[in-house]
Structures are given as structure tokens and as C-alpha cells.
Image (cartoon, rainbow, N blue to C red):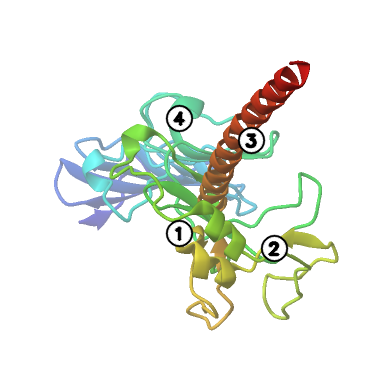
Amino acid sequence: SVGGNNNDPTSLWLRRDPGHSWRIRNEGGNLSFVGGANNPSAERLNINTSGDISVGGTTVINSSGNIAHHARIPNLPASKITSGTLPVSRGGTGRSSFSNERILFGNGTGGIDTHSRLSYNVSANQLRLNGIMRAEGYNTRAGTGGSYGGSSFNIWWTGSQGVLYMDAHNVGAIQGTSDRRLKSNISPLATSGVEQVMALRPVSFQYADVPGTVFTGADRILKGFIADEVQAVIPSAVTGEPDGLTEDGEIQPQLLEAMPLIAVLTQAMQEQQAIIEAQQAQIDAQQAQLEDLLKRMTELEER
């Protein structure tokens, strides 16, 4: 039923039964919605003369249209937090007020810094995340005061090493693991290191400016190798294929990995050292024979 009340002329009553009474109250110019199941005197919503909106006694939107820094969803049951939903502070310990103009998303189980999932601190200019962030890429400054570039990067873990991507381009491994416990089928290199080194072609070069890509070139003259040439000699030292393209039809550069090259160079040096030591042993033996012959000749001359 809908009606007034002679004992409360400021209210309009909306009553279904005694346990579920609601009323719209005008008190001093403030408009309130009061009542609900088994609590007819509880204020649920209030709009004051300044235009501030309060829910459950807490201001959530002020007269300027700004959401209050302590706005929250109180006592949100855990059963309502499912995949795909983002609760804004369920309430609980540490959620009655926020300092430093924080915008916070959390589970409401403890203090802001300890248990918040995502917060922004204006005074410290910090976005803080307690958890795992998933992103397609990151765009950062050159240092802390430089300008932002036009590309984004991300790092992907293959299961044995981190790989750096710039936009859609794989630009190289960051670091590989080398622990014996993570390796199997360990065996010496079967191919001659010296032969492989002699088949390599060291060159000098400059990086080219490729229009419309992240590869803008450099004037500095560098020394190194050409990836597809190395691939023909030491396949494990190169990732990618000659003239490879990304899904967008852009250049996917071949990548040169240093560790296989270092292994082959080490093997070549060991092979050369073995040759040197064998030759030195032969020279020492010949020197001993020569000294013995000279000694005998001297003895014969003295007779």
C-alpha cells in the first residue's frame, strides 16, 4: 500500500507488510529512502540539499559528480566474486577510509597496502599491483625522464629462457639456463670446431633503416656475422628462417644466439691447442735428438 502517516507528515510510506516497510522521507530538505526487510528505520539512500548522494550512510557521489574516494560496495559476499567480475573493495578491515587519494580494488580482508589488489597512490605516483598482470605489451620512457617510444615490448618465457618481443617482433633471448639439472642427452660436440670456425665469415656492417618498422637503423659500424650464413654452419646458433615475416607481413628478423657460437669457438681453440701441444712435443723430441747428435759429434772430434 502507499500512503501517508499522520504521526510522520514528512514521509510517504510504501508498505507491503509490517516486516517489509519502506518510506520516502523529506527531512530538512534531505530526501531519504528508509526501511527494508525487518529494519524499517534504517536509512538506505540519502540525497542532501547539496546534492551529495549517500548509500548506507556513506557518501558515494558528491554534488560535483565526483565519486568519493572511500566509495565501496560493503559486505559483498564472496559467492558474488566470480571470474570476469571486479569488486570495488568488499569492505572489511582497512576499508573505512583511503589515504593519498587511492583508487583501490581489493578483497577487503585486511589493510590497504597489504591486501589491496590494485591501488594508485597519487602522492607517490605509483600504481601498485598485488598479483599477476597480463598485458599485450608495455610502452615505457627512455629512462625516467625521456620520451615515450612508439613501440611496446613484452617478455615471454619459453620454459628454458626469456624471449624479448618488440611489438610483434622476436628480438632475442634475454638469458638461457645452464644448470646441469635442467639438461639431458649431454654429449661432446662431434663436428670439428676448427672446420666450423673456418667456414664462418666475419663482417662489418651497419643496421639499416627499414621504413614502417621498429628497425630504424644506426650509423655505428659494427662487427659480427650474417645470421643465415651462420645458420648454414651452426644451425643451433640461429633462430628463425631467412626472409621470415610476422603475421602482419613485417620483417621477423633471424636471431643469433651467442652460446652455440661460444661453444664452437671453445672447441676450435681446444683442437688448436691440442695441435700446438702435439707439435711442441715433436719439436721438443727433435731438439733432444739434435742435442744428442751434437754431443756425439763433439766427443768424436775430441778423440
Q: Earlier in the sequence, mark 3 or mark 4?
A: 4
Q: Nearer the viewer, residue 243 or 16?
A: 243
Q: CA distance from mark 4 to mark 1?
A: 56 Å
Does residue 108 show up?
A: yes
Label 3 SS: helix
Residue 165 left/right relative to 299: left
Q: Which residue is mark 1?
A: 236
Amino acid type, callout 3:
Ile
Whole-percent x, y for residue 277 in the image: 58, 35
Q: Which residue is mark 3?
A: 283
Q: Nearer the viewer, residue 147 or 209?
A: 209
Q: CA distance from mark 4 to mark 2?
A: 64 Å
At horizontal 51% and vertical 52% (from top left) the residue drawn is 193
Q: Which residue is mark 4?
A: 95
Amino acid type, callout 1:
Ser
At horizontal 73% and vertical 81% (from top left) the residue drawn is 211
Label 2 SS: loop
Amino acid type, callout 2:
Pro
